[in-house]
Image (cartoon, rainbow, N blue to C red):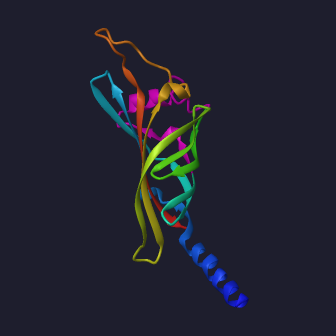
Amino acid sequence: MNKLAVILAGILVSGSALFAAPYSVDVSHSSVGFKVKHMMISTVSGNFSGFSGSYDLEKGKLKSLSGTVKTTTVDTGIQKRDDHLRSADFFDVATYPEMTFAMTSQKGKKVTGNLTIHGITKAVTMTMDMGGEITDPWGNKRSGFVLNGVVNRKDFGLNWNKAIEAGGVVVGDDVKITIEIEGVAD
């Protein structure tokens, strides 16, 4: 009877390992984007083309997640604005060429982690929408999910702004973040 219990326990342990998988972010099928109010009346959207990351997923739950974004790759579609965002007024890419995120916990759809921007680290919580896990036509195991959150840019030392004559400011404080991830199992 003890042999049977040991065999069953071994099957359960090895079977649960089949459901856990480390993934590398597939940057060609992922994106890191943001939106922020402009002049209090419209929204500017942008993204970062340079990023990398990895995560560990077990039965649809994140066990770990970390990523790095190259601040030099900020793109809003307007070169002059992008150059301003790269300057010391905002990201100061010469001093802070990267921003990072490292997950600390997941509770249901809430993912919490340490976000570092401009050399300042703050805990942030984002909402996760799990897309699922599949095997692609080439036999690769893939998974996908989306993270949405809002941060106050001033919490990270991104303080530049100008007052508008009619009231309000040029750049809103709240920045909406959307991270769309597709990963390939390592």
Q: Is residue 100 magenta?
A: no
Rendering coords of residue 110 (x, y %): 47, 48
154 vs 35, left or right, is: right
Whether residue 74 is in magenta: the answer is: yes
Query: Residue drawn 47% across and 53% down?
Result: 108
Q: Is residue 9 visible?
A: yes
Toward the top, the furthest residue is: 165
Q: Residue, x 28% and y 10% (percent of image)? A: 166
Image quadrant in which you'd find residue 55 = bottom right
Q: Residue 7 at x, y = what percent?
A: 67, 87
Residue 165, horizontal then vertical, whole percent: 31, 8
Query: In the depicted view, which residue is nearer to us: 8 or 71?
Result: 8
Q: Between 120 and 89, which is closer to the camera in this rendering?
A: 120
- Residue 176: % across, % down: 40, 37
Q: Is residue 156 above or below residue 181?
A: above
Q: Vertical placement of 53 versus 125: above or below?
A: below
What residue appears at the point 27 percent right and 24 percent down from the top-left corner?
A: 41
User: Which residues are the magenta region?
Assistant: 66-95
Towards the viewer: 6 or 116:
6
In the picture, measured across the screen, residue 62 lies left or right of residue 43, that is right
Q: Is residue 79 left or right of residue 123?
A: left
